[in-house]
Amino acid sequence: MDVKPGLCWRCETRLQSKKELCFLCKIAVYCSTKCLERDEARHGSVECKMWSRINKCEACGRIGRMKECSGCYAAWFCDKTCQGFAWKSHKVECSKWTEKAREVALAKKICV
């Protein structure tokens, strides 16, 4: 995220003494619970998972070295077995994020 230090990651207003911190990555900072909740889809889907360094298998829950979903880049799996096992439940989320990425790319005229 390219927000300047001292600004809310959602609305980019100056942070006051009372601020909300992402409970997973402990990096993203928000001016309110409302901004934290509104940024969950964007931040939680990719940034938080990348920066928290807590890669957890979507199928078995194991934590450690994982392979990233090549469709949405938002899910992690131990191996092809776990990926196959979790595909039925992950397929919907994967398609949703892949489509959002395409929409953004088309809006910005970027090739994906």
Image (cartoon, grey):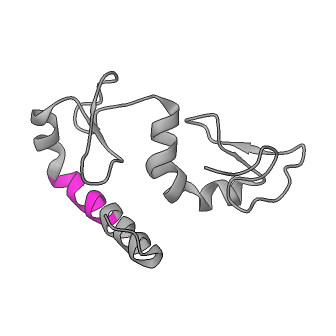
Judge left or right: residue 95 versus residue 51.
left
Return the x and y of residue 111 as percentages of the image width and height.
33, 67
Number of residue marks: 0
Return the x and y of residue 21 as percentages of the image width and height.
69, 41
Which residue does the image show at 71% across and 54% down from the upper left? 33
User: Which one is nearer the viewer's eye here, 108 or 18?
Assistant: 108
Measured along the vertical axis of the image, is residue 14 above or below residue 60? below
Judge left or right: residue 55 versus residue 25.
left
User: Which one is nearer the viewer's eye here, 4 or 75?
Assistant: 4
Which residue does the image show at 39% across and 76% down from the upper left? 106
The stretch of residues the image draws in magenta is 88-96
Question: Hey, which residue is sitting farthest bottom in the picture?
Answer: 107
Which residue does the image show at 21% across and 57% down from the upper left? 91
Judge left or right: residue 6 versus residue 49.
right
Quarter of the picture containing the C terminus is: bottom left
Question: Hey, which residue is sitting farthest top in the picture?
Answer: 64
Question: Hey, which residue is sitting farthest right in the picture?
Answer: 17
Hey, which quadrant is residue 92 in on the image? bottom left
Q: Is residue 3 magenta?
A: no
Return the x and y of residue 24 as percentages of the image width and height.
55, 36
Return the x and y of residue 70 as percentages of the image width and height.
24, 48
Measured along the vertical axis of the image, is residue 100 above or below residue 23? below
Q: Main secondary structure of the magenta part?
A: helix
Judge left or right: residue 46 versus residue 95.
right
Hey, which quadrant is residue 83 in on the image? top left
